[in-house]
Image (cartoon, rainbow, N blue to C red):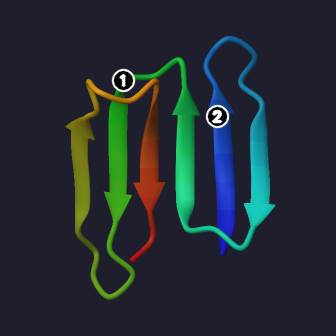
Amino acid sequence: SNLLHFYGSSNLLHFHEDSNLLYFHGGSNLLHFYGDSDLLHFYEVSWYPFAVICWC
């Protein structure tokens, strides 16, 4: 698994192993991919400083 960090100001993408999380820094939308389906979910995280994406 990879952890992806997206910095909105610099557009840098950071991949980290041992994680299913995808972070959008400076963004408000959370993108959720379901590993066993083609479903794609968008929603906001108002209580978190950055969005988290999890491959389940």
Q: Residue at x 64, y 34 (%)?
A: 6
Q: Residue at x 77, y 55 (%)?
A: 15
Q: Which residue has dot 1 on it? A: 28
State left or right for residue 11 relative to residue 49. Answer: right
Residue 50 screen position, x and y as percent: 47, 29
Q: In the rendered structure, which amino acid carries the disc numbered 1?
A: Ser
Earlier in the chain: of badge 1 and badge 2, it is: 2
Quarter-of-image position of residue 54: bottom left
Q: Residue at x 29, y 27 (%)?
A: 47
- Quadrant location, the N terminus: bottom right
State left or right for residue 18 relative to residue 44. Answer: right
- Quadrant location, the C terminus: bottom left
Q: Residues within 10 Å of mark 2 (few under 14, many from 20)?
A: many
Residue 51 screen position, x and y as percent: 43, 36
State left or right for residue 30 relative to residue 50. Answer: left
Q: CA distance from mark 1 to mark 2?
A: 12 Å
Q: Which residue has dot 2 on it? A: 6
Q: Residue at x 38, y 30 (%)?
A: 48
